[in-house]
Amino acid sequence: MTLADIPPEMGLFPLSGVLLLPRGKLPLNVFEPRYIALVEDALASHRLIGLIQPRWQEDEDEDNEAPPLYSIGCLGRLTSMTERADDTYAITLTGLLRFRLLRETGLRRGYRVARIDVSSFAGDLNEIPSEPFDRAQLLSSLKHYFQKKGLNARWSLIEQMDDSLLLVTLPMICPFPPAEKQALLDAENLTDRVRVLQTLLDLSGPEQEGPPS
C-alpha cells in the first residue's frame, strides 16, 4: 500500500488508553452498534479504520458522545475478524501508518468520520531501524516497571524479539496513561520512541504491594 491508496476520509474508532503503532497488531472486541457498523463498512471498502484517542479535559464530562480527539492517530488494517453468535466481532487491526486529524465531517451510521492527512508519516510504510540503543538497560527498566506494577510477562519471548518488534510491542503492552501512550505515538521515529519509552519506564509510578485486582 502507498500513500496514494489511503482515502482522504476515514471512519474513526476513539479508544482511550489504547495504542496502535505501525506494524503492531491490536486485538479488539467490537460490540457497540456504531462500531459494528464501522467494521462492516471497512470490510466492504478499504479495510482501514482510524484508531485515535479521546483528549479529555478536566472540565469535560467523559460520558460525552463526541469528546475532543488527539490530533494524531494510527490507521489499522483489518487483518482478521470473527463474527460471534450475538452479531458482535472479534477483530485484529494491524498498524499501517499514522495520520493527522484535519477536521471531522460528521457521523456515518453512528460513528465519527474525519478528513485525514498521512503525508507527514510516509516513513511509517518502510521499516527504518532505530539508531543503536542500550537494549539491556531498556529491558532492565521494563522488568523493574513490571515489578512495581505487579505485572507478569513472558520474558523469554520478549528477550527473543528483534529491536524493531520490541519497539512496537513494548509501548503497546505497557499500561501507560493515555497522555503517555500518545507521546509514544507522536514520537517522530523509532529512535525518538526509544527515548520516550525509556523515560516513561524510568519515571513510572510508586510500587504496588501486589498484582492489580
Image: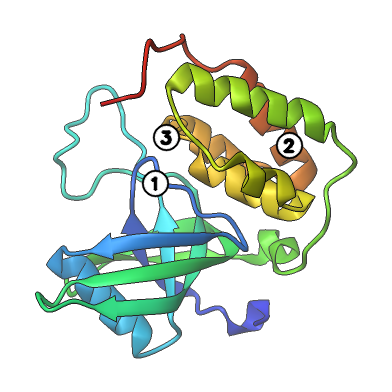
The percent position of residue 27, horizontal first and vertical second, equals 40, 61
Q: Is residue 33 above or below residue 191?
A: below
Q: Which residue is label 1 attached to? A: 53
Please tell me whether mark 3 sits on a helix, a strand or a loop: helix
- Specify whether 15 is left or right of 30: right
| Kind of residue sitting beneath label 1 | Gln
Marks 1/3: CA–CA distance? 8 Å
The nearer-to-camera label among 1 and 2 is: 2
**SS type, badge 2:** helix
The residue sitting at 41% across, 71% down in the picture is 10
Q: Amino acid at mark 2?
A: Val
Which residue corresponds to mark 3? 178
Please tell me which residue is depicted at 70% across the width and 25% down the height of the picture. 140
Mark 1 in CB contact with mark 3 (< 8 angstroms):
yes
Sequence order check: which comes first, mark 1 or mark 2? 1
Q: Label 2: which residue?
A: 194
What amino acid is found at the position of numbered circle 3 in the picture? Pro
Q: What's the distance in space between the residues labelled 3 and 2, CA to CA?
A: 18 Å
Question: 176 left or right of 69?
Answer: right
Q: What residue occupies the far right of the structure in this picture?
A: 132
Query: Residue 191 is drawn in which quadrant?
Result: top right
Give the mark nearest the N terminus, 3 or 2.
3
